[in-house]
Image (cartoon, rainbow, N blue to C red):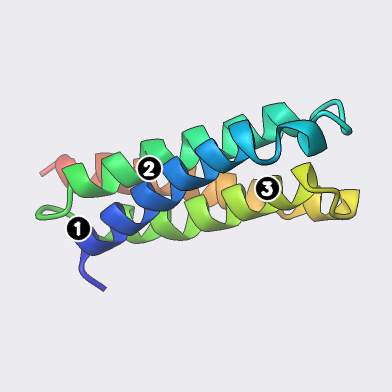
Amino acid sequence: MNRLVTAGFLGAIAIALGAFGAHALKDRLALIPEASGWWQTATFYLLTHAVAIGAIAAHSAWPARLWAAGSAIFAVTLYALALGAPRWLGAITPIGGTLLIAGWVALAWSARK
């Protein structure tokens, strides 16, 4: 998939889910003490990496791929936890975070030339 398409899609999803969490899910997220924070963190990381993917779209494929995969895993697991999914799902969240870090390392590696 085109990296700008990916960036646009992830950015739109982040904005929509952020608004959905702030408005439609406000009462539900209040039921779990950490839920609102999880939702905000997921949205922030998803949006941040959508912008990053768009910014490097023409330059480097691997960081964008790693960020897209990492953002999806990281955000989806946090959104699920915020909605009451089993806590063991939180053990998967660091896989997404590791992919995000790997994307930044790949960007640094590709820029060293």
Q: In 3D space, how far apart are the residues under numbered discs 3 and 2 (Cα atoms)?
A: 16 Å
Label 3 vs 2, first from the N-terminus: 2
User: Camera-side residue: 22 or 113?
Assistant: 22
Crowding around mark 3 (Cα neighbors within 10 Å: few <14, some 14 to 19, many 20+) is: many
Crowding around mark 1 (Cα neighbors within 10 Å: few <14, some 14 to 19, many 20+) is: some
Q: In 3D space, how far apart are the residues under numbered discs 3 and 1 (Cα atoms)?
A: 24 Å
Q: Which mark is residue 4?
A: 1
Residue drawn where x is 69% and y is 45% of the image: 78
Label 1 vs 2, first from the N-terminus: 1
User: Camera-side residue: 25 or 47?
Assistant: 25
Element class at badge 1: helix
Q: Quick check: 86 above or below 111?
A: below
Amino acid at circle 3: Tyr
Disc 3 vs disc 2: Cβ atoms closer than 8 Å?
Answer: no
Q: Residue furthest bottom?
A: 1
Residue drawn where x is 27% and y is 49% of the image: 53
Left or right position of 60 against 44: left
Residue of label 3:
79
Q: Residue furthest front?
A: 24
Residue drawn where x is 79% and y is 32% of the image: 27
Quarter of the image that includes the N terminus: bottom left
Place of residue 28 in the rendered image (x, y in percent of width and height, measured from the top left):
80, 38
Residue of label 2:
49
